[in-house]
Amino acid sequence: MTKTTDKANEILPHPDDIFRENLYEHSDSVVAIEKNFIDSKRFATASKDGSVVFWKFAETGSDELVTFDTVIEPFQFSQGSNFHIRSVTGIKWYEAEVIAASLTDGTV
């Protein structure tokens, strides 16, 4: 499925055609998309569902445009405490393999 825009009848791929890794979809709205400033082929998405998903842009010539890398589930933010993560409100890369995430309870 494609969508045609008014901009010179440009045809854009449907998101389902790009993000085929449907086992790792967020179950609520995405609130942040952050590109890795060191590795330009990686980016992360954060959601109201409390998860952060890491993605990689596929190599040129691949059937997939984007592939799943890894995920941080809501329970992984608690680190043994009993509070419930309701939502991740923002993310920012700190280092190549480290991100900061802000949560609805005000913690980072």
Image: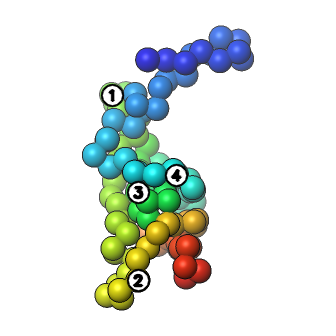
Along the line of sight, which residue is nearer the eye, 68 or 97?
68
Q: Is residue 24 above or below residue 70?
A: above
Q: Which amino acid does label 1 sit on?
A: Asp
Element at badge 4? strand
Tag of residue 90: none
Q: Tell me which numbered mark, 3 or 1, is placed earlier along the sequence.
A: 3
Q: Tell me which numbered mark, 4 or 1, is placed earlier along the sequence.
A: 4
Tag of residue 83: 2
**Between tags 3 and 2, which lies in front?**
2
Quadrant where the N terminus sits is top left
Element at badge 2? loop
Q: Which amino acid does label 3 sit on?
A: Val
The part of the image, by quadrant, that contains residue 49 is bottom left
Are the two marked residues, 2 and 4, in contact with CB atoms closer than 8 angstroms? no
Residue at mark 2 to residue at mark 1: CA–CA distance: 41 Å
Mark 4 Cα shell of 10 Å, populated few (<14), some (14-19), many (≥20): some
Residue at mark 4 to residue at mark 3: CA–CA distance: 10 Å
Residue at mark 4 to residue at mark 1: CA–CA distance: 25 Å
Residue 25's x, y, as percent?
37, 47
The part of the image, by quadrant, that contains residue 76 is bottom left
- Residue extending farthest to the top is 9
Which residue in the structure is indicated by mark 3?
Answer: 53
Q: Tell me which numbered mark, 3 or 2, is placed earlier along the sequence.
A: 3
Tag of residue 30: 4
